[in-house]
């Protein structure tokens, strides 16, 4: 194959793009997606709405719940899935959503929870909710990380 020949075939998607010429811009390749050229979020992460979702979901699942390890493990997963689904329903463009839920027995012990990640303080954010009843505690965190 000649080095200057246009590449076309099953691996190239049949575009016929010539590798020796200047590559097309993002606008030429994806004209139907003008947001590809954005340098920051067009809409801020709605922290107050996410706080309300966390409170509603956690309280509805745990208000009358007694601490039982096996059952609470499943409830923690269910809470995380429900929170993630409701936050995604807010349709926040270009944000990746991460939900972490911890449930533990409330019995004269302490617990410290920490998290670390690469963070852009201008566009990335989180919401957190702490819940306690007579036998358990729960901490639910939602991280909204902007994806460029």
Image (cartoon, grey):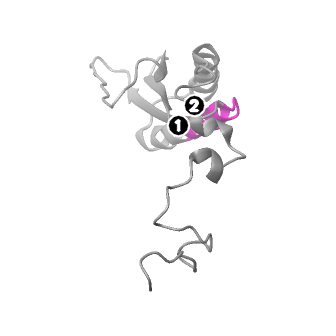
| Helix, strand or loop under label 2 | loop
Q: Which residues are magenta?
A: 78-91
Task: Kindly identify the residue that appears in the image at 29 percent across and 17 percent down.
Answer: 108
Q: Closest to the observer: 120 or 142?
A: 120
Q: Nearer the viewer, residue 48 or 56?
A: 48
Q: In x, y percent, where is residue 45?
A: 58, 21
Q: Which residue is mark 2?
A: 38
Against 106, residue 76 (above or below) is below
- Depth check: 33 or 60 in front? 33
User: What residue did someone put label 1 on?
Assistant: 96
Between the C-alphas of marks 1 and 2, the distance is 16 Å
Q: Give the label on residue 118, or none.
A: none
Specify few, some or many for label 1: CA neighbours under 10 Å numbering under 14, 14-19, or 20 or more: few
Residue drawn where x is 58% and y is 47% of the image: 26
Viewed as shown, does residue 108 lie left or right of 89? left
Look at the numbered disc 1 and give the secondary structure of its residue.
Answer: strand
């Amino acid at each position: 194959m000649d080095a200057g020949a246009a590449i076309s075939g099953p691996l190239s998607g049949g575009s016929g793009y010539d590798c020796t010429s200047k590559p097309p811009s993002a606008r030429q390749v994806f004209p139907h997606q003008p947001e590809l050229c954005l340098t920051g979020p067009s809409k801020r992460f709605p922290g107050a709405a996410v706080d309300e979702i966390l409170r509603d979901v956690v309280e509805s699942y745990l208000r009358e719940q007694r601490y039982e390890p096996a059952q609470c493990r499943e409830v923690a997963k269910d809470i995380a899935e429900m929170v993630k689904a409701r936050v995604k329903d807010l349709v926040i463009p270009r944000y990746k959503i991460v939900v972490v839920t911890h449930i533990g027995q409330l019995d004269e012990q302490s617990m410290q929870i920490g998290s670390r990640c690469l963070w852009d303080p201008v566009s990335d954010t989180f919401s957190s909710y702490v819940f306690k009843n007579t036998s358990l505690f729960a901490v639910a965190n939602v991280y909204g990380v902007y994806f460029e």
